[in-house]
Image (cartoon, rainbow, N blue to C red):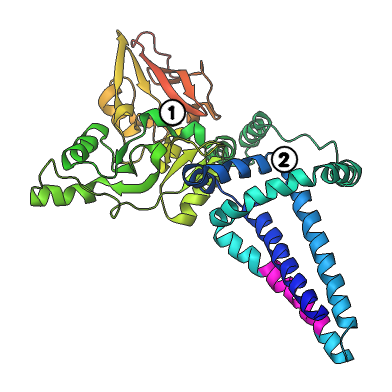
Amino acid sequence: MVEAILFACMAVLLAVSGACSATETALFGLSHADRSSLALHHPRASRAALSAMARPRGTLITILVLNTAVNVTFFVLSSVLSARSDSAAIGAAIGIGSLLAVIVLGEVLPKLLANAHRVAFTVVLAPLVLIASRTLGPLRVLLDSVIVGPLARVIVPSERPPALRTDELESLLEACSAEGLIERDDHRLLADVVALNQLRVRDAMTPRGRMAWIAAESTNAELVEAARSHGLASLLVCEGTPDDGVVGIVKVREVLAPIARDGADPSRRADLRDAASPVPFVPDRSRLDRLLALFSERGVDTAVCVDETGSITGMVGLDDVVRALGLAPIEGGSREHERVERLGPNRWAVSGRLPVHDWADLFGAGTTASSLDRRASTVGGLVMAALGRLPVAGDEVRLGRLTLRVESMMGRAVERVVVTLMEAADAPEKP
């Protein structure tokens, strides 16, 4: 009878140990997409998870203390059960079996399941962790202030060496380029790498107010109108609005082809859920280099941006990254960058993303192909190549009879350039 009670207690303790391991994996592994799904479908569990993760170190201490206490109690009962066995062989089998049970059923299996189903485990376990954290509050505070805090200050140095600032790294690249230690192409490539490391997704994304999206159950007429008004190759598909949930992304050409071919009724509703492809969610504070790594890993070129609460703040695509870096625009994108505004006689305002191949058509009278840097693909690239560094507002360069002055920047990319055509008599004489 006693042995049966001990086995039952050990089974309960083993389940609690597995729950502690699963909780740690699920809570600390939540992605922004997981948090968004929790906030949408399980608001109570979402609030519990946010409250628990507001103090991650305290939550981790609570989980570890509870898990350690449960495991120690489990092995104490296992030792009692072994001592009560009739033979040494049975006692040894109980001891080995208890160890394997804790490793497999109390650690490995729960962590694997929790990592695969983070949202489901969080819905069940987050409220329990919050209750345990409040119950063990005094013990947690004592351990944090007496043991964990002092150890953290000893192990982690209080003063870290100052990080190399972006302007210092750029100056180093310019100096190396001027001394001939690196080639000009290498200089520009390294400057782009620095920009990728410094720019954030929010610097390149299309804000939510200008996002191109459509409801999943829109009519054919609404679909055609959305495609015409946005003029983009892809549209984000939502359940109703972006706040109601994101279904995925559709290629406009693929969903319009059946309508054009079959002459579908404009008032007929087209369910776009089957045609939508999954779209990843990325934090809008993430770096652009991590965004490109995500695109490469998932094989996609578009992502939905979210803030720290999981709310949608915009969309970002590969073409947005290209524009943020001041590189060549991607074919099929918006043509707004090709607009040229006349400011006065022999004076124009152009986008820094104006392609160089349009240069001869617009300003052929003021410069020659030989005066252009063939490695530059945009007007912003021309300015950067002439300066040999990243431009700032107010920089001015000359190309033949043309003067290019940087009027504004968008992040690290040239946004607007004022081009002035000098009269032949005012142009600098060639040596």
Q: How many marks?
A: 2
Identify residue for label 2.
55
The location of residue 134, given as percent across then percent down, is: 75, 43
Camera-side residue of 312 and 4? 4
Q: Which residues are magenta?
A: 94-108
Identify residue for label 1.
380
Q: Earlier in the sequence, mark 2 or mark 1?
A: 2
Snapshot quadrant of residue 158:
top right
Camera-side residue of 205 and 14? 14
Amino acid type of the residue tagged 2 in the rendering: Arg
Which residue shows up at 65% across the image and 60% down it?
A: 22
The reply, left or right, for residue 226 in relation to residue 265 is right
Q: Main secondary structure of the magenta part?
A: helix
- Assess whether residue 96 is covered by the magenta stretch: yes
- Where disc 2 sits, the SS reads loop
Give the mark toward the camera: 2 or 1. Answer: 2
The location of residue 333, given as percent across then percent down, is: 31, 37
